[in-house]
Image (cartoon, helix red, strand yellow):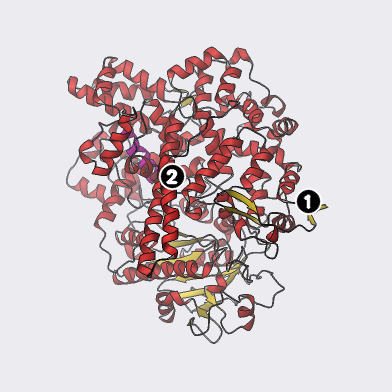
Amino acid sequence: MHPILPSTRREFLRLGAKGVGLLAFSRFAPQFLVQSTLAAPRPEKDRRILVLVQLAGGNDGLNTVVPYADPAYHALRPTIALKEKDVLRLDDHLGLHPSMAPLHALLQEGRLGVVQNVGYPNPNRSHFRSTEIWETASASDESLSSGWIGRYLDNACAGAGAPGFARDNEPDAIHVSAEVPQSFGGGVPHNTYGLSLGANAGRDDVALLERIASRPDAGLAAHAGQDHDETANHAFLRATLMDSLVAEKRIQRIIDANKPEAAYPFGNFAQSLRNVAGLIAAGLSTRVYFVSLGGFDTHAGQLNSHANLLRQLSDGLAAFQKDLTARGLDDQVLTMTFSEFGRRPNENESAGTDHGTAAPLFVMGQKITGPLHGTAPSLKLEKNADLTFSTDFRSVYATVLDRWLETPADEILGARHERLGFLA
Amino acid sequence: MPTPSLDPREAWKPLPAAAWNSDLARHLLRRAGWAARPDEVARAVNEGLPVTLRRLFPDNPPALERPVYLMRADERILELQRLKRSAPTVEDRRAYDREENALEAASASEFAFKWLQAATDPARSAYEKWLLFLSDVYVVSFEKVRRAELIFRHWDIIRRNGLGTAPELAKAVSRSPAMINYLDLNRSSRRAPNENFARELFELFTLGEGNYTEDDIKQAARAFTGYRHNREGFRLSERDHDKAEKNIFGRKGAFDGDDVIDLAYARPAAATFLPREMARFYLSDQPLSHEFFAPLGDAWRASGFDLRELCLRFFGSVAFYHPDFRASFIKSPVHYYLGLVQDLGLDVIPLERTTLQPLRQMGQQLFRPPNVRGWVGGRLWVNSSTLAARRQLARTLCSPFDEERLNADERLEIEVARDAGRRRFTVDAERIRAFTALGPRGIADRLCDFFLPGRVDDGYRAALVDYLEAAPDAAAFEDRARRAAITVLQSPEYQLC
């Protein structure tokens, strides 16, 4: 339970120095003070931040990183294959989708990497189940209740002073989506914050609400004479409310004051990234951000809609990276895309593609080494067969956890997975 | 896991008549509907549980007329489509497109308002919530369908079949034009069957994951080929329909779509699938064991999958009233909103800004579920930004209605609503003044006992009493009475039912 107090330790100390008697009316304060003397805020240059970008619906990998030189590709997709003259060449075999010029430029500058043909054994073609597999980092036949980011936060909180533990009252992870991503679910609740465009922080007096939410021995009895036991949902609601009362004042202030140093395109996706950049620039100790771009379930007539989605992705990510670079923050942020599955290599009769298996994903940041990782999928396929993955998605996670977040990856993933070369 | 204390064989037996009381009536009214208004609680206690349930889930479910606006918009949309075909330039066509999109969006909003208005009527709350549940199983989304008229018809199909048998409902829904669009049946043909609908039919509508094979899906997809629709509704395109033999669930035959639905309901998993979905929507966000539902599933199968029988049994059972399932369920945004409207005795404000926008910010846009699974619900409803939106809504509905801020269009909407007799949009000063006569203790008790589920601990009441007693004068007391009400509606406890 987080007390209502100044929203950062630094702010607290500043107010304290001015002699504001906060201790006088907060029963939480003594513990808060003890904590603050134990661990001073880390300097901002040490932060390692991960931004996850979900491409919801199942991104068509073959039309994202295009094997334009392979005749099999054109045979599989008589109407939706992209032509050699249109793709943005990566080498003599592969090119990026034509609407991703900004990401192509970043790749040539060495700040974008492609991990090819990422998937997992025994692929599931259900959106929900496969999203769950990706977000919980589970095997296809096992069911985990916690997310991989949640387990990372569990781990970070368990060891005092371990990297990844956000400062008091600052969210451990922030998502820009109406629902909390499954990735964030931990063995213990974490302070996560949902940011929505246009969410309005309350301005009225919240003292009574604070008192009610923070009262000891809170409970609801089913009926008179019963014990006032607090249910798990009740406790969860109280904790979320207290956390949000603290966080919202501060975060809204930051976003109002955000002055990006790059032009972001219109649209919710780019604007979400704009706000994330503002929060990073403000020095929040939050380690993980989650942004979602939806609409990739392109069963029919996909040429235009997919081009439009990849343009939003590319323009948004490039603006974000430019903004971070201009603010001197690009060495602190790694961005990574993921999607629940790729799509069927054969186009369907509706000029779209059905649910498939493996697909490439992007990693972006100043520390990325090398443009292409893993191997491209083989297109020597039976009719309507699926791709066979060559890089397990948990290897991508293991690399990020180990080499970026500097945390015991194998422990969090429950098994040893090969590390990849996109981070040294 | 709350189940261990309940024996599945006992759980689904009818609640003994002697156990029925006002606490249980409040639980029923809040879970099956939105709120427990004192007059409705008294009536339910008086009538007894079986009579109450037969009233909440009636033989002849109430109709909802097609909003006039939808009919007018539809005429204009037809005209626009003609105009587009003969448009001389791309710019002209774009202008028609824009008008069409705007009309569709406005029509969807209009339907949302009409549904919310209907749902606030206590006499129809339970059935409208049941439709919300069924539409959360048989999901379609305006985001993809883009035709408000088809969304309206989809709900109408569910409404007309909502208390019949489940296989008949599934068959009717497979013919719903919105569903045919949403899951790509309109693109599925003998030569190129599209698997989208067949997959969701098994995974999300009837059986659940793990109860079919990939091959069952491929074969079933063939049975649903040729499903098309035109202005009159469903039609089967014989040319595109695959009449050849299929092999589904180990049975061979020249099955059509209806046969596939019957085959699905013959599978063991069908008997417990919908009851489990009901439990997730009405009872608990914790997954309950399959065994727990087995006796309910058996009874439901024996009734011929009669949905009304299922409702009467479910909401009349020992399990539904078990203390573990009370005052512990997180309200959905629609529930929170309609609960406020009923608890406060208000009318739906016919303005996007004050009604539909808050629903969106709380995470639930009517007719726009996030994906084909529908809303997951439970704790996923709650994060700091959705809680902030809930708090803002409580504040808006308990504050004087600010007509100065309205633009001309909004004023017109308000006038129309007033002419139709709907004028209580927010809690006005008069009602707060009447409330202050109860005094600090009386106000605290009234707020806790009327609005909160179960019985709240003394610390909660004490916080309210202290706050009210600290008012220095009568004006401040009135202000504090209002703020106390707002705070109770914002508090974690009011998010539960």
- In depth, the one of B281 and B491 nearer the eye is B281
Q: Which mark is residue B70?
A: 2
Q: Which chain letter matches label 2?
A: B
Residue A341 position in % (x across, y down):
58, 63
- At x 71%, y 32%, the residue is B300
- In depth, the one of B29 and A236 nearer the eye is B29
What's the CA distance linking mark 1 and mark 2? Answer: 42 Å
Answer above or below: position of A300 versus B253: below
**Magenta residue check for B190:** no
Q: Is residue B210 left or right of residue A79?
A: right
- In depth, the one of A167 and A78 nearer the eye is A78
Answer above or below: position of B212 versus A360: above
Q: Residue A382: which quarter of the image?
A: bottom right
Answer above or below: position of B185 versus A240: below
Answer above or below: position of A122 versus B24: below
Tell me the SS state at disc 2: helix
Q: Amino acid at mark 1?
A: Phe
Query: Mostly what secondary structure, the magenta segment?
Result: helix
Image quarter in which the N terminus of chain A is found: top left
Residue B332 position in % (x across, y down):
47, 38
Residue A191 position in % (x across, y down):
42, 47
Residue interval drawn in magenta:
B383-402
The residue tagged 1 is: B249
Q: Residue B98: which quarter of the image?
A: bottom left
**Magenta residue check for B396:** yes
Tell me the SS state at disc 1: loop
Q: Residues within 10 Å of mark 1 (few under 14, many from 20)?
A: some
